[in-house]
Image: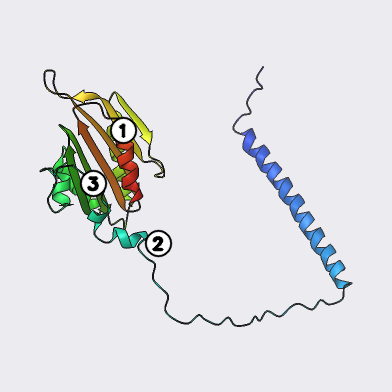
């Protein structure tokens, strides 16, 4: 049988009395210990303490060599962001839906959303800086698009928020498999196993991957007329993240 609960009025009183007793015992112990310490120290010979002064350490001379791009990630990400994008594989063809110069400004990136005006305002608030993009097609209908979206992140972690927002949308799709992208924390790759399009038309399968590192959010989109494998999307995601 469960013991009856104590009334709210009783519990604080009991807890307060216990606290007072513990505090009093601790105080008596502290006073007694202090007195004993004085008595013991009074009978001892004076102890000579070491000098507090230390030898002066000579400052190194010469200029400090700056870190290389391999050692300092900011050198790479503050440069030409397009150079961090995966290169088109051999035999792949260019696509007309990717800007020729490889850049997407704020307005162009906002247009990728169903509510461009609302998204434009959100990107301004999130301190959108720039977006580098590449894409290619191969075979009959295999298409890839990769974006690196960079934020200033002076007041918020927008790269994290943007990436997680795309996670939420990907996970809302039914018939979707997903996997963690190694070395990215919460980065994930998704394969949508149900094709897009209406009956009677050629099916269009899709996959996507989203992750972030520092002030950059990575987005990968893949489309094909046949089911896309886990290996395909994971290979793209892992190789792209290795460049950031």
Circle 2 is placed at which residue position? 71
Residue 112's place in the image compared with 23, above or below, is above
Of the numbered discs 2 and 1, the one sitting upstream in the chain is 2
Question: In percent of the image, x 66 and y 40: which residue is there?
Answer: 15
Question: In percent of the image, x 79 and y 55: which residue is there?
Answer: 29
Question: Going by the image, does 225 lie left or right of 13?
Answer: left
Residue 200's place in the image compared with 234, above or below, is above
* CA–CA distance in space, label 1 to label 3: 16 Å
Badge 2 element: loop
Question: Going by the image, does 214 lie left or right of 62?
Answer: left
* CA–CA distance in space, label 2 to label 1: 32 Å
Quadrant housing residue 142: top left
Circle 3 is placed at which residue position? 147
Q: Foreground residue, 216 or 244?
A: 244
Circle 1 is placed at which residue position? 190
Of the numbered discs 2 and 3, the one sitting upstream in the chain is 2
Question: Going by the image, does 19 lie left or right of 192?
Answer: right
Asked if residue 104 shows in the view, the reply is no
CB atoms of marks 2 and 3 within 8 Å: no
Q: Residues within 10 Å of mark 2 (few under 14, many from 20)?
A: few
Asked if residue 56 shows in the view, the reply is yes
Q: Foreground residue, 205 or 5?
A: 205
**What is the x, y in percent for residue 55?**
63, 82
Badge 3 element: strand
**What is the x, y in percent for residue 91?**
18, 42
Question: In percent of the image, x 37 and y 65: which residue is there?
Answer: 68
CB atoms of marks 1 and 3 within 8 Å: no
Question: In percent of the image, x 33 and y 28: which residue is there?
Answer: 177
């Amino acid at each position: 049988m469960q013991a009856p609960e104590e009334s709210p009025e009783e519990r604080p009183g009991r807890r307060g009395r216990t606290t007072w007793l513990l505090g009093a015992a601790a105080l008596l112990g502290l006073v007694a210990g202090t007195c004993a310490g004085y008595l013991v120290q009074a009978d001892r010979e004076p102890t000579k303490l070491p000098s507090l002064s230390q030898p002066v350490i000579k400052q190194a001379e010469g200029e400090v060599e700056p870190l290389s791009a391999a050692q300092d990630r900011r050198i790479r990400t503050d440069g030409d962001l397009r150079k961090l994008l995966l290169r088109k594989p051999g035999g792949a063809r260019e696509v007309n839906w990717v800007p020729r110069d490889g850049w997407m400004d704020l307005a162009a990136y906002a247009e990728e959303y169903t509510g461009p005006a609302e998204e434009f305002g959100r990107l301004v608030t999130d301190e959108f800086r720039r977006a580098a993009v590449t894409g290619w097609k191969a075979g009959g209908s295999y298409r890839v698009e990769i974006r690196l979206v960079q934020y200033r992140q002076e007041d918020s972690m927008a790269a994290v928020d943007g990436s997680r927002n795309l996670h939420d949308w990907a996970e809302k799709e039914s018939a979707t498999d997903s996997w963690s992208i190694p070395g990215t924390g919460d980065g994930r790759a998704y394969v949508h196993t149900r094709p897009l399009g209406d009956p009677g038309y050629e099916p269009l399968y899709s996959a996507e991957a989203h992750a972030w590192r520092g002030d950059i959010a990575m987005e990968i989109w893949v489309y094909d007329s046949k089911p896309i494998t886990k290996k395909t999307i994971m290979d793209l995601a892992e190789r792209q993240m290795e460049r950031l």
